[in-house]
Image (cartoon, helix red, strand yellow):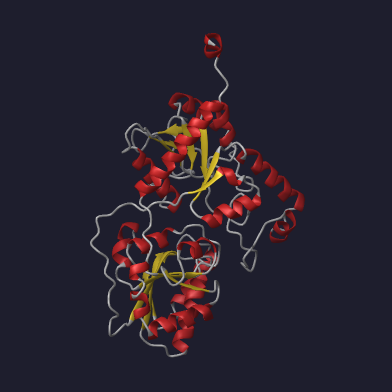
Amino acid sequence: MSHMHPAVSRGGAEIAAYQMHQAFLTKPGVSSVFLAASAGKVQERLGARFVQPFGEGEWVYSGAGFDHWIHANPDPEFPPEFAALLRELSPDVVHLHHYTNFGVETLLHIRRALPQAAIVLTLHEYLAICNHFGQMVKRPGLGLCETSSPRDCARCFPERSEQDFFLREMYLKRFLRLADHFVSPSRFLAQRYVAWGLDPQRVSVIENGMPEHALPPAELPQADPEDGLVLGFFGQISRLKGIDVLLDAAALLEKQKVEGLRIDIHGDYSGQPPAFRELFEQRLEKLPGNVRYCGPYENRRVHHLMRSVQAVLVPSIWWENSPLVIQEALANRRPVITSDIGGMAEKVRDGLDGFHFQAGSPFALASLLRGLAERPERLAALQPTLAVPPSVQDTAAATLRLYRRLVADQRLSAPPSPAQEIAA
């Protein structure tokens, strides 16, 4: 189950879920059905909440409307139709890659419809912990938040009381307790949720795998005599992704007259709030001479684009979990220059897979980039130590091992049926 279908939304979570489904279909003795929510992007048919616009074996929940405060689904048609579909499919395992758009109560609907099925939930962001889009940064200044509490959260959202946040936490934990196991793509995310209250024995770290592409060997291009070292930013353009840090660092480098370095920005900002779009467009009109804005790109071109640079920049100012862009960079044998926090610091080993700099500091980033411009061979020297990200098949195999263990545990703990009791 995924909160969106990749045919209508190209986010990392839905892509990872769908790739897992496709990998399962290649495994002997395994059948898989994919169920996605559409958040109003797929129209219902004749009042049916569950439709199959993308083919057999793929269902889409076409309801719309969602309470993002407590992650609840107000659709009265969802519970009975969802339960009927579950009973018809009768799976051994139900794996949610997100509860957004379905509702956290989905865990209860699954447990009631399929008492013996194993329920797995993959954690993304910190949505249950943090009401600020699950990103654990404080309002309004976007300072890093180390931990949550009703008092601290009410300071970020003064329109809500401490009691509101206490009840929100109790409500979410009530349903999360129904999951048999949780999967986290990073140790950092797992540790945050364990500190929040999840049972560490029910949390496993399984990284999202990269699809296997038939790509030629990724040789590191030599620095161009005219442009020098070329670094690339890829992905969503937003404040939390650190675009201001990047542009401020570039301006510092230009002011210091650092030569031999160019930054290419590949990404889209059209989906951001109007205030951010206006400010970013103003910055585009006054870009430093060492920055080139290349515009949006199709994800299928990311490998080609990454191979045009010597390193990839990931300057996010929030605790990223497991950014897809890091795995894409490593798959293309490109070192990563990243903030020293969260899953970014975990996935990029400083001095082995790339280099860290102090999160949120344009001065620290500018200092690091100045050093690399002066000695670009430091990036080439990382080639032998760059990590190889797991493949989708690796992730599917690890997940299937978890499923089999959970199913075996469920069968051992299941009460005997009336027929078994009579036979005994």
Q: Position of residue 249 (x, y in %)?
A: 48, 80
Instruction: Work out whether 260 lies above or below 20.
Output: below
Quadrant position of residue 46: top left
Residue, far top: 422
From the viewer's side, name the closer residue of 93 and 318.
Answer: 93
Please identify the quarter of the rendering in which residue 28 is found: top left
* Residue plotted at (36% across, 59% down): 388
Q: In this rendering, does residue 367 appear at all?
A: yes
Q: Position of residue 252 (x, y in %)?
A: 49, 84
In the orientation shown, which residue stands out farthest toward the bottom? 257
Residue 118 is situated, as x and y percent measured from the top left of the image, at 51, 33
In the rendered view, tell whether residue 356 sits above or below residue 6: below
Above or below for 346 versus 415: below
**Whether residue 97 is situated above or below residue 221 in the rendered picture:** above
Going 48% across and 31% down the picture, which residue do you hit? 407
Q: Between 353 and 148, which is closer to the camera in this rendering?
A: 353
Q: How many marks?
A: 0
**Going 52% across and 79% down the picture, which residue do you hit?**
364
Asked if residue 115 can be seen in this view, the reply is: no
Q: Quadrant of the C terminus?
A: top right
Q: Position of residue 281 (x, y in %)?
A: 46, 72
